[in-house]
Image (cartoon, rainbow, N blue to C red):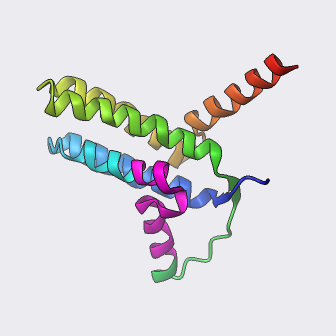
Amino acid sequence: MAARMIDRNAHRWGAGISAVALLVGYALDLSWMVPLIGVALGIGVLFGLRYSPLGAAYRFAKRIFKLDLPVIPEEEPPPRFAQVMGFAMLGLGTIGFYVLDNPAMGWTFGLIVAALQTLLAVTGICVGCEMYLFGKRLSAKGAA
């Protein structure tokens, strides 16, 4: 069975939105931005990236502004794994803010995700995707 495909542009756009939201949250000390973006990532993790609010924002903007951007197909599993990692890190940030009363911990995890999302949005390099592919190569070597 072939892997489900997504539009790479939507993946990068969503990364840009989440990076900007987290950076604005940091600048304005809006700690609630960390769990908010975590929930957005979690929706994609749980239900598939086609249901991600971040990807939906891309599709909405593309339609409203009549952007003639080509669809660049990409297999879903690597970006979905990357979102699992982002979701987990933002979960730790949320715990830092709201359970441990430790804003430094909250913003550390939030800013790590913001940095990785910025890297993806600007360059197309998805660190979580590369981790997924590295793990697949390792497991293939172990099976051989």
Q: Is residue 96 in sight in this rendering?
A: yes
Q: Is residue 104 above or below residue 20?
A: above
* Nearer to us in this view, 69 or 39: 39
Q: Residue at x 47, y 50 (%)?
A: 46
Question: Of all residues shown, which one is farthest toward the left?
Answer: 101
Residue 48 is inside the magenta segment: yes
Q: Please tell me which residue is depicted at 40% across the width and 48% down the height of the picture.
A: 42
Q: Residue at x 58, y 45 (%)?
A: 79
> In this rendering, does residue 124 appear at all?
no
Residue pushed farthest top? 142
Residue 136: x, y in percent? 72, 30
Q: How many numbered discs sit on the rendered protein?
A: 0
The magenta stretch is 41-62
Q: Position of residue 106 (x, y in %)?
A: 23, 30
Question: Is 14 on the left or on the right of 105, as rendered?
Answer: right
Rendered view: 50 above or below 126: below
Indicate the quadrant where residue 118 lies: top left
* Nearer to me, 52 or 59: 52
